[in-house]
Image: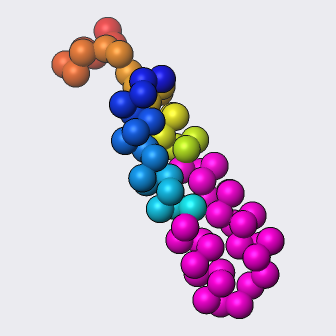
Amino acid sequence: MKISSIRKWLPIVGLAAIIPIILNLVLGVSIIQALVASGLTVLLVVSGFLFKSFGRDRRPAGYENP
């Protein structure tokens, strides 16, 4: 994993962590539930980025299976 990709992901992950906290506090949910929702959202975003980075097909674009 490259440092440049982590720097690229960090603002998006930070935003994904803040949005559930703000929404839950506006709705009057307890802080524990807001933190759990935030943690689950961050986990979802990071796992999506990991699958995107490491799940790429390394074959050329015009390659087809025989």
Q: Relative to residue 36, is residue 13 drawn left or right?
A: left
Q: Residue at x 51, y 34 (%)?
A: 51
Name the spot of residue 23 as percent of width and height, x first: 58, 81
- Up the image or down, 30 lies above or below 48; here it is below
Q: Count the numbered circles shown.
A: 0
Q: Position of residue 21 (x, y in %)?
A: 62, 73
Magenta stretch: residue 23 in it?
yes
* Image vertical order of residue 2 relative to residue 27, above or below: above
What colour scheme does the image use?
A: rainbow
Predominant SS of the magenta segment:
helix
Left of 51 or right of it: where is 25? Answer: right
Write the residue at 55% across / 44% down: 46
Residue 49 image position (x, y, % from top left): 48, 40
Query: Is 23 left, or right, of 40 in this rendering?
Result: left
Query: Is 5 placed above or below 36 here?
Result: above
Quadrant (top left, top right, bottom left, bottom right) of the C terminus: top left
Q: Measuring 31% from the left and 14% from the top, which residue is drawn there?
A: 59
Q: Position of residue 57 (x, y in %)?
A: 38, 21
In the rendered structure, which segment of residues is drawn in magenta?
18-45
Q: Is residue 21 magenta-colored?
A: yes
Residue reaching furthest to the top: 66
Comparing 23 with 65, the one in front is 23
Q: Residue at x 75, y 64 (%)?
A: 36
Figure check: 44 above or below 6: below
Left/right of residue 60 with respect to residue 46 in the rendered view: left
